[in-house]
Image: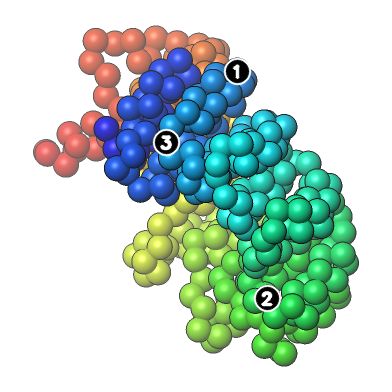
């Protein structure tokens, strides 16, 4: 079984079956990137169910494999412990590298720093940054500095992050756009608008860093809070003039801004144009935002049509958004849509949500829906319409 197939199974299996599913995919012939992706996804699912003992058993078993002397392989274990929030295990694994015969470089160091950030022990990052490179004889790279800057920003110290940015310049280390964007976002998040604009001008105008769509999306995140769609559109035009095409996240900010202003037709048009005119695909946030605000305006049937599209592209919104929709459909007398929605979600929701969903359906007088001999969800209903 390939790691990609195992990953698809992981999303639907019970936690008890995850371990065996990934073990079957952990084939030495597969690429390290695919294996790491599947491994971290399995660990996330186990962590969500608080199966930390199983995670430890799962990851520690890898240390007896021949690949453990390869730094990328061991680094994936460190990262996975970080994904689970099991930082002490990540640190122990890093400290075991000498005994395991695994060389150290910025690669494994970056895995450890990432584990710090994922485990939210941000204060450890600068400590290790100042200690481990000299202790183990390697140089931090631009990715190491990027994680360091993120840690400072997470600790509420973007000033210190900017000081280390100057250190990167002095050492001739490339300032990556991710580092730039991280500090920019921290300044906007703290409400330091003038400092954020000054930082942008200093970095971009002086050509120290070239912004990308992510950088502009941080600015859009700030601008859309102003509640002025015109300001969001103007910034998106600035992006395009700079040769940067807005992405789905960019358009989500415009959709949200329209929704907050009650301009639902305009928001729906942006959504409709995403695929048709822009060649982009709506993401989960697109569907969640639009469905919620359509419901808020009482446009439940339109919201249901958007929901149907989310099902087809496997981007179903969260439970609370769909609860809002189902209640609106049922209370508004749109029983066919409500029943079809229940049949679909009964098939799509993970087991941990089905009990709450069933209770909601029962409270709305729809408790028997989905128990009929022949269930017809959104997809099958659409297929029947297409065939007539």
Q: Nearer the viewer, residue 304 or 32?
A: 32
**What residue is shown with label 1?**
53
Q: Give the secondary structure at mark 2.
A: loop
- Per the image, label 1 sits on a secondary structure element best described as helix
Q: Residue 365, image x and y in percent?
A: 48, 12
Q: In the image, is residue 128 above or below residue 100? A: below
Residue at x 70% of width, y 53% of height: 136
Q: Nearer the viewer, residue 27 or 341?
A: 27
Q: Is residue 111 left or right of residue 192?
A: left
Identity of the residue drawn at 55% across and 85% down: 242
Along the polypeptide, which appears first: circle 1 or circle 2?
1
Where in the figure is residue 227, as x and y percent of width and height?
72, 63
Which residue matches tag 3? 66
**Tag nearer the camera, 3 or 2:** 3
Query: As rendered, which of 65 and 252 lies closer to the eye?
Result: 65
Q: Is residue 353 left or right of residue 31?
A: right
Residue labelled with disc 2: 173
Q: Are marks 1 and 3 in contact (CB under 8 Å)?
A: no
Whichever of callouts 1 and 3 sits on the residue coming sooner in the sequence is: 1
């Amino acid at each position: 079984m390939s790691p990609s197939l195992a990953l698809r199974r992981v999303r639907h299996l019970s936690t008890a079956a995850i371990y065996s599913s990934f073990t079957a995919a952990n084939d030495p012939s597969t690429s390290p990137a695919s294996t790491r992706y599947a491994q971290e996804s399995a660990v996330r699912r186990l962590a969500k169910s608080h199966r930390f003992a199983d995670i430890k058993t799962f990851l520690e078993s890898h240390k007896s494999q021949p690949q453990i002397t390869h730094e990328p392989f061991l680094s994936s274990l460190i990262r996975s412990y970080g994904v689970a929030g099991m930082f002490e295990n990540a640190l122990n694994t890093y400290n075991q590298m000498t005994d395991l015969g695994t060389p150290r470089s910025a690669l494994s160091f970056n895995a450890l720093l990432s584990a710090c950030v994922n485990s939210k022990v941000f204060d450890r990052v600068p400590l290790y940054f100042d200690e481990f490179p000299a202790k183990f004889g390697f140089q931090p790279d631009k990715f190491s500095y990027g994680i360091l800057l993120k840690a400072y920003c997470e600790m509420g110290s973007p000033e210190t992050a900017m000081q280390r940015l100057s250190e990167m310049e002095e050492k001739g280390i490339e300032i990556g756009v991710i580092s730039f964007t991280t500090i920019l976002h921290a300044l906007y998040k703290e409400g330091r608008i003038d400092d954020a604009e000054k930082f942008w001008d200093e970095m971009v105008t002086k050509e120290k860093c070239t912004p990308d769509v992510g950088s502009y999306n941080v600015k859009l995140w700030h601008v859309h809070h102003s509640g002025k769609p015109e300001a969001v559109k103007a910034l998106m035009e600035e992006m395009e003039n700079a040769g940067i095409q807005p992405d789905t996240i960019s358009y989500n900010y415009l959709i949200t801004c329209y929704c907050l202003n009650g301009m639902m037709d305009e928001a729906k048009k942006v959504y409709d144009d995403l695929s048709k005119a822009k060649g982009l695909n709506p993401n989960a946030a697109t569907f969640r935002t639009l469905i919620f605000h359509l419901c808020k305006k009482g446009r439940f049937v339109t919201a249901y049509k958007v929901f149907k599209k989310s099902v087809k592209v496997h981007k179903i919104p969260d439970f609370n958004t769909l609860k809002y929709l189902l209640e609106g459909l049922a209370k508004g007398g749109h029983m066919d849509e409500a029943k079809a929605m229940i049949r679909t979600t009964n098939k799509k929701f993970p087991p941990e949500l089905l009990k709450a969903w069933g209770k909601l359906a029962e409270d709305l007088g729809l408790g028997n829906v989905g128990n009929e001999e022949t269930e017809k969800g959104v997809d099958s209903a659409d297929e029947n319409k297409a065939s007539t």
